[in-house]
């Protein structure tokens, strides 16, 4: 890979072109920032330089500050890795330069990239470049003057929207708003930018220092009103995200005290936010997401992914139709196989429904929707399977049925074809037992609805070949899923980790805690809904079936609540039959259903675990911990057993599969912030009070006692050597 560097070239016209080069997005790594300082100094010094153009290599201006620098600050605790960009580079070297500077923008100017461009005296852009300040998605605010210059260039209202929503705009929109001075073709970009810079020098074009403008920010009272409204909104929509409030505050500070003071304030707040838990969490998720597709022994041994052009889905139920939809949207031909034409029609109808739904919600264009549907073919036998590259089986969980299907597939599909099963409860080795194709059998565990949920667990057995895993990872990327490679065990990574989640909620209710209080607290923690609303959504049948699977697999640590059976017995099945913990009415938020109380009382009597028959008294924090610490405990087992390759895979899986709040960094990351020791001691205490459901795992105990982070790779805890 090419090293990051900044090029410098002075033309016969006296224009110095400074080019940032750090593929693929010219991220502002430290050498780039240092290089820029040197080059701008050089341009200022040299007599043959009359004007300056700043641009990026490879058709991209810059994707922003190198996020790995912030990661380094987190890993080392040393903030001195953060360079002074906002004053030394943007204000002193660029904006206050005695020579005019023009940004020639192409492709993208995001985050720090756009902030550099805004420090220039004019911005010329190629069509359709992406411009934005997405910093808030990482828990920080723009730190190179963006909070000050964007409002001054495009007005407060639009600037606030762009920052708080992290929403980029195009060059065209930027031109209308005043962010971009002119749009020219990509071929003419440099030529026009050089001329523009020279004309600024000759005062034939305005020499604008954005930070000194005030014409677009309105009166102080108008600004205060607008920012006050934004603040109120943020309080409601993002109560957990300190960077949102901070962003509004810093903008206001600059309006009250002037742009330069604003820049200094911004830098100060930026530095604080970089080391906030929110930034740590979001940046962990950023890198976790990028790490999942690096699989030792699969992606680092020189294999090339094979193209999957045609796939087949066996079974057109809810899951099969969802999987087929996802594949179609990824531009892959799909055969949908069912056992009779009635069921086939039903499956196709579901797929059409899925696609129309996305169309209606504006997630797809009509053209894309039509194209996707044109790739679908329904079949009732395997004749057409002779040239498929991938089959995903999604029939009901029945071993002998699956075995029959796999041995049929083996006969008809070409030898390179990947045979994947969506089974969650049946051992894949048994599924493939009657075939001689075990090297190309793997699991593909989608989350329902499969065309919406972003996570894909790829399950490998000891026999699955690296090529097949690589191909499935590639398909996963093509259909825009996050593919996490996991090992075979009950529940795989996500369901195994989270089975204690609903069980702990049930346990608490039987101990006398109010179910709605639990849901509210879990929502306040950051999950979109609480465990009881989730149960309503999934239907109680799912919960019963799932608890049985886990009760069989882990009898030492399950909690069996009588409540579910009682609910089902009284004709309740959650949201889909309108009888859940909540009352669901169109157009209003779900309301607690008081008629459920007697059933809960009955369950408590039946269960009889309340100490002295009285509800336990617990704080809000304890409730959250009593639900999430058992999840952490199970996550430890997942790590210990090597079900995931690395802790951050479980972080991303928890965020994408269970909607664990991303700003908490994922389940393991959060646990390390809380501290293994506190989790361990709490679990030990609850084990004494409430039984083995809470019993700390060996992994947790060891790490808590030795002070090793749960996320640290196994090598840092040397396994005891077996004694002969
Ligand atoms: N500096 C900031 O404050 C900030 C905040 C958010 C996003 N961004 C940038 O915006 C772009 C789009 O973000 P997205 O979430 O849509 O990602 P994306 O997945 O669509 O694109 C990510 C790109 O970022 C590159 N990348 C990987 N590691 C990086 C690093 N350490 N620093 C910079 N770039 C890296 C990848 O190679 C990839 O091309 C990215 O380039 C990202 O760096 C910057
Ligand atoms: C597999 O598909 C069947 C049929 O749609 C479904 O009942 C089952 O829940 C799916 N299993 C998984 C793990 O997705
Ligand atoms: C499982 O499938 C086999 C073969 O298709 C069938 O004979 C059997 O009845 C099924 N079992 C159940 C429990 O549905
Ligand atoms: C796969 O997981 C199941 C369920 O835990 C287990 O019964 C089976 O032995 C496992 N197979 C392998 C090869 O690990
Ligand atoms: C995993 O969890 C989801 C959601 O609760 C459920 O639909 C699916 O059937 C579960 N699979 C297993 C193995 O428990």
Image (cartoon, grey):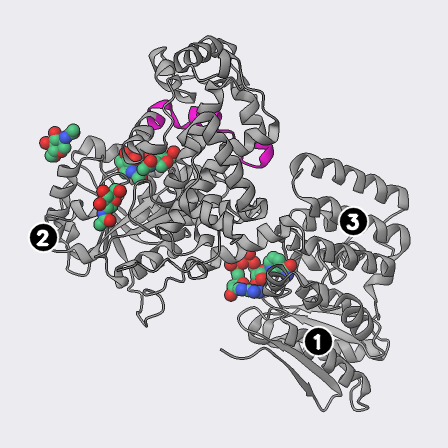
Q: Position of residue 461 (x, y in %)?
A: 24, 53
218 or 459, which lies in front? 459
Q: Which marked residue is nearer to the observer: mark 3 or mark 2?
A: 2
| Distance between mark 3 and mark 1 Cα atoms | 27 Å
Image quadrant of residue 226? top right
Which element type, helix, strand or loop, lies under badge 2? helix
Kindly identify which residue carries mark 1. Answer: 193
Q: Position of residue 703 (x, y in %)?
A: 48, 50
Kindly identify which residue carries mark 3. Answer: 156
What residue lies at 59% left-to-right and 61% top-to-bottom?
75
Q: Which marked residue is nearer to the observer: mark 3 or mark 1?
A: 3
Q: Is mark 2 within 8 Å of ligand 3?
A: no
Kindly identify which residue carries mark 2. Answer: 411
Q: Which marked residue is nearer to the observer: mark 1 or mark 2?
A: 2
Image quadrant of residue 431? top left
| Distance between mark 1 and mark 2 Cα atoms | 64 Å
Residue sticking out furthest to the front: 724
- Residue 422 vs 210, above or below: the answer is above
User: Is 538 part of what is drawn in magenta?
Assistant: yes
- Residue 664 vs 544, above or below: the answer is below
Magenta highlight range: 522-543
619 or 702, which lies in front? 702
Residue 313 in view (yes/no): no
- Count of labels in the image: 3
Asked if residue 682 lies left or right of residue 377, the reply is: right
What residue lies at 38% left-to-right and 24% top-to-bottom?
539
Looking at the image, in which quadrant does ligand 3 appear?
A: top left
Q: Position of residue 73 (x, y in %)?
A: 64, 62
């Amino acid at each position: 890979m090419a090293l990051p560097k900044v090029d410098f070239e002075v033309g016969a016209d006296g224009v110095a072109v400074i080019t940032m080069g750090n593929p693929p997005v010219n991220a502002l790594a430290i050498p780039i920032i240092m290089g820029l300082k040197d080059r701008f100094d050089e341009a200022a010094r040299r007599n043959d330089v009359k004007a300056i153009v700043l641009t990026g290599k490879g058709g991209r201006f810059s994707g922003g500050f190198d996020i790995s620098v912030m990661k380094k600050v987190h890993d080392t605790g040393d903030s001195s890795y953060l360079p002074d960009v906002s004053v030394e580079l943007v204000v002193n070297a660029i904006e206050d330069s005695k020579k005019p500077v023009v940004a020639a923008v192409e492709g993208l100017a995001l985050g720090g990239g756009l902030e550099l461009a805004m420090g220039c005296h004019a911005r010329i852009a190629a069509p359709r470049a992406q411009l934005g300040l997405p910093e808030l998605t990482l828990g920080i605010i723009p730190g190179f003057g963006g909070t000050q210059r964007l409002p001054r260039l495009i007005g407060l209202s639009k600037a606030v929207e762009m920052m708080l929503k992290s929403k980029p705009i195009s060059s065209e929109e930027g031109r209308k708003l005043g962010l971009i001075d002119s749009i020219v073709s990509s071929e003419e970009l440099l030529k026009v930018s050089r001329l523009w810079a020279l004309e600024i020098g000759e005062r034939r074009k305005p020499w604008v220092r954005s930070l000194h403008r005030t014409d677009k920010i309105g009166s102080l009272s108008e600004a205060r009103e607008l920012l006050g409204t934004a603040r109120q909104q943020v309080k409601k929509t993002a109560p957990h995200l300190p960077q949102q409030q901070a962003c509004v505050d810093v903008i206001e500070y600059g309006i009250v005290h002037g742009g330069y003071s604003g820049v200094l304030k911004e830098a100060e707040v930026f530095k604080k936010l970089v080391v906030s838990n929110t930034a740590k969490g979001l940046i962990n998720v950023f890198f976790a997401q990028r790490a999942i597709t690096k699989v030792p022994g699969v992606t680092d041994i020189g294999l090339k992914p094979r193209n999957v052009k045609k796939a087949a889905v066996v079974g057109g139920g809810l899951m099969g139709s969802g999987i087929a939809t996802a594949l179609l949207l990824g531009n892959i031909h799909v055969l949908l196989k069912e056992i009779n034409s009635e069921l086939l029609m039903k499956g196709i109808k579901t797929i059409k429904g899925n696609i129309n739904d996305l169309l209606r919600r504006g997630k797809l264009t009509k053209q894309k929707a039509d194209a996707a549907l044109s790739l679908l073919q329904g079949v009732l036998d395997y004749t057409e399977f002779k040239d498929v590259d991938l089959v995903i089986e999604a029939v009901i969980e029945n071993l002998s049925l699956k075995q029959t299907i796999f041995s049929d597939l083996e006969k008809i599909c070409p030898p390179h074809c990947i045979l994947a099963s969506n089974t969650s409860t049946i051992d894949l080795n048994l599924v493939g037992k009657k075939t001689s194709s075990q090297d190309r059998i793997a699991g593909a565990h989608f989350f329902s609805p499969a065309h919406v949920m972003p996570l894909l667990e790829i399950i490998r057995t000891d026999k699955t070949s690296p090529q097949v895993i690589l191909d499935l990872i590639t398909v996963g990327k093509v259909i825009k899923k996050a593919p996490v490679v996991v090992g075979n065990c009950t529940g795989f990574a996500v369901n195994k980790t989270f089975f204690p989640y609903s069980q702990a909620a049930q346990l608490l209710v039987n101990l006398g805690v109010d179910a709605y209080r639990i849901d509210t607290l879990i929502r306040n923690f950051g999950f979109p809904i609480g465990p009881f609303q989730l149960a309503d959504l999934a239907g109680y049948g799912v919960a019963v079936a799932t608890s049985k699977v886990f009760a069989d697999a882990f009898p030492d640590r399950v909690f069996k609540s009588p409540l579910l059976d009682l609910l089902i017995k009284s004709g309740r099945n959650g949201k889909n039959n309108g009888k859940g913990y909540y009352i669901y009415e169109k157009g209003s938020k779900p309301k607690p259903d008081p008629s459920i109380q007697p059933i809960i009382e009955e369950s408590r009597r039946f269960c009889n675990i309340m100490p002295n028959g009285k509800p336990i008294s617990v704080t809000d924090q304890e409730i959250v911990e009593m639900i999430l610490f058992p999840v952490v405990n199970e996550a430890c087992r997942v790590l210990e057993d090597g079900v995931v390759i690395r802790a951050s895979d479980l972080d991303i899986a928890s965020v994408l599969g269970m909607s664990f709040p991303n700003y908490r960094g994922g389940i393991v990351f959060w646990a390390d912030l809380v501290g293994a020791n506190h989790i361990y001691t709490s679990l030990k205490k609850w084990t004494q009070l409430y039984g083995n459901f809470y019993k700390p795992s060996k992994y947790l105990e060891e790490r808590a006692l030795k002070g090793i982070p749960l996320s640290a790779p196994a090598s840092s805890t040397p396994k005891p050597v077996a004694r002969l």
